[in-house]
């Protein structure tokens, strides 16, 4: 339970890029705060200028590299009765951005936490993708290491919900290639970049097509990927080559051969014997 002597932690949903998306609540909280912890203080000052907000707060940086050390100082200020606002470069703090550690620490300390909601790259990209939006999962950034990334995508290959990822423009091509290998070249997807900004662009197509497009015309800026969920086995796709390749991909990702065959049988809607025979046919065993 919080006490009247402690402050309040306020999470601020920032515009993804277009300052006109800022809410009146965001403006009010920026003007009201005693302390503003910002992922990028320069971007915060630019946003304050665009919103015609003159803050009275002290401004401090709060980003991945200093988050652990800075959290303690912010909790102390909250104990002193300060109203501490947290804002990231766009979207909601703690969602693949700094903030979660501070929220958890504040809750554990019995300090009140509230939120001024705002834009979300996840739901914005999802709505623009043309993919089913009734059920989805957010996976954040894919692992950087190739083996870890392949293992994750293998685990998600039969995820039926629409999937949303964040990705760096430097790694998006290799990520799309890895997705195509795990999910299939023709799995529908959308690459959404620079959402709400001047150069907003939505590229839609199969994963292999998007990977080729990223190689020919590398996308820049902040990227959100939306991937269609698995729709179940297609008998026409259960060729010996396809099944053997799927088993090999699972084994390469570290899955035991027996389990790999079982998973592939489920994926293609066939028996494990059919998968075994397919591997023999293409000499994968």
Image (cartoon, grey):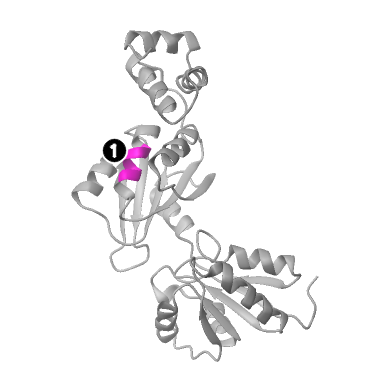
Q: Is residue 217 left or right of residue 91?
A: left
Residue 10 at x, y = what percent? Answer: 62, 74
Magenta-colored stretch includes residue 73? no
**Most frequent secondary structure within the magenta stretch:** helix
Looking at the image, residue 272 lies above or below residue 83: above
Q: Is residue 58 left or right of residue 40?
A: right
Label 1 Cα crowd, 10 Å radius (few <14 / some 14-19 / many 20+): many
The residues colored magenta run 174-179
Residue 233 at x, y = what percent? Answer: 45, 23
Asked where in the image residue 56 lies, by quadrant, the reply is bottom right
Q: Which residue is mark 1?
A: 208
Foreground pick, 24 / 265? 265
Residue 123 in view, yes or no: yes
Asked where in the image residue 201 lies, by quadrant, the reply is bottom left
Quadrant of the frame with the C terminus: top left
Write the residue at 51% across / 20% down.
Answer: 266
> For numbered disc 1, what is the local secondary structure?
helix
């Amino acid at each position: 339970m919080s006490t009247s002597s402690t402050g309040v932690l306020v999470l601020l949903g920032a515009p993804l890029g277009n300052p006109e998306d800022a809410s009146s609540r965001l403006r009010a909280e920026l003007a009201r705060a005693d302390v503003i912890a910002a992922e990028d203080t320069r971007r915060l000052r630019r946003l304050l200028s665009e919103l015609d907000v003159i803050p009275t707060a002290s401004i401090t940086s709060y980003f991945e590299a200093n988050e652990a050390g800075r959290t303690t100082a912010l909790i102390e200020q909250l104990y002193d009765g300060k109203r501490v606002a947290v804002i990231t470069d766009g979207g909601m703090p703690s969602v693949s951005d700094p903030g979660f550690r501070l929220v958890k620490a504040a809750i554990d300390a019995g300090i009140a936490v509230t939120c001024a909601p705002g834009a979300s790259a996840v739901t914005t990209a999802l709505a623009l993708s043309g993919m089913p939006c009734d059920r989805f999962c957010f996976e954040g950034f894919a692992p950087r290491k190739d083996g870890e990334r392949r293992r994750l995508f293998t685990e998600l290959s039969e995820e039926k919900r629409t999937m949303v990822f964040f990705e760096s423009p430097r790694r998006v091509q290799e990520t799309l290639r890895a997705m195509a290998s795990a999910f299939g070249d023709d799995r529908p997807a959308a690459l959404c970049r620079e959402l709400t900004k001047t150069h907003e662009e939505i590229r839609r197509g199969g994963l292999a097509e998007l990977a080729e497009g990223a190689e020919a015309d590398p996308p820049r800026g902040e990227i959100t990927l939306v991937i269609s969920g698995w729709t179940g086995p297609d008998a026409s796709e259960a060729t010996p080559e396809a099944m053997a390749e799927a088993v090999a991909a699972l084994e390469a990702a570290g899955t035991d051969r027996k389990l790999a065959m079982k998973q592939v049988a489920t994926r293609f809607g066939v028996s494990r014997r059919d998968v075994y025979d397919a591997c023999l046919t293409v000499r994968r065993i």
